[in-house]
Amino acid sequence: MSRLALLFDLDGTLLHSDPLHHAAFVSVFAERGRDLDIEEYNTRILGRPNADVMADYFPGEEARHVEIADLKEARFRDILGASADPTPGIHALLDWAEREGAGTAVVTNAPRLNVEAMLAAAGLAERLTLLVIGEECPRPKPDPLPYRMAMEQLGATPATSVAFEDSPSGLRAARAAGTHVFGLTSSLTPERLRDAGAHETIADFNAPEIRAYLDTLKARQG
């Protein structure tokens, strides 16, 4: 029998970190004479791999793409600091997963240094230990491969997995992997999340829709 699995994006899903990323990008862009408002960030950058963002915004600086991206991420970690509040309800949901023997994983396009810093700041590092990092996979999100890799490592299938995402890139990846997807309204409207592939939209992990769907999955397993 396949295992139940809860698969979590990180930025904007486990932590409301997108305003911090926007601020870090604004700092880097300003040094290059560019502006970046929050709507453009949400439309063109949110959830995308750094390599794609660098190619779009700095086409004449290919040799410096890694350096620019690393600078942005270092500034993000400085803004993040040593502690941060996770999205409400996550600890109760992880308690449920432990009681039920469900697998859990973080599936993210964030660099590993960011992932480790965010999970530690939110007090989740010891609770979420399986990390599938997009830039360490053959293909990052929006490709479904990171989600498929997480399911394989957990002994789960698309029919027994649930994904939580906040960005169009991540939603497309999870839907293409065949999972049921909850879209978190941390940065985008419910309409935009549904347009990108969310089956249901929620404000946080206290949403009753989550437990209702998980109860349905358990009933299917008998």
Image (spheres, grey):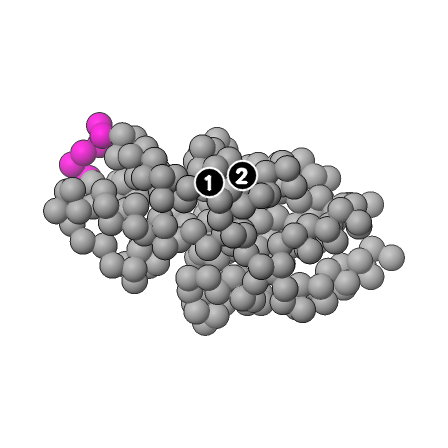
| SS label for mark 2 | helix
Most distant residue in the front direction: 82
Label 2: which residue? 120
Instruction: Identify which residue, 113 or 213, lies in the foreground.
Output: 113
Most distant residue in the left direction: 33
Q: Are marks 2 and 1 in contact (CB under 8 Å)?
A: yes
The image position of residue 25, as x and y in percent, is: 28, 46
What amino acid is found at the position of numbered circle 2 in the picture? Ala
Query: Range of the magenta residues?
Result: 59-65
- Rate crowding at label 1 as few (under 14), some (14 to 19) or many (20 or more) other CA atoms within 10 Å: few
Q: Work out how far the residue at label 2 is from the one at label 1, CA to CA, in angstroms.
A: 8 Å
Q: Is residue 102 magenta?
A: no
Label 1: which residue? 82
Q: Nearer the viewer, mark 2 or mark 1?
A: 1
Q: Is residue 62 magenta?
A: yes
| SS label for mark 1 | loop
Residue found at x 35% / y 48%:
21
On residue 172, the disc is: none
What amino acid is found at the position of numbered circle 1 in the picture? Ala
The image position of residue 77, as x and y in percent, is: 39, 39
The image position of residue 156, as x and y in percent, is: 71, 44
Task: Tell me which numbered mark, 2 or 1, is placed earlier along the sequence.
Answer: 1
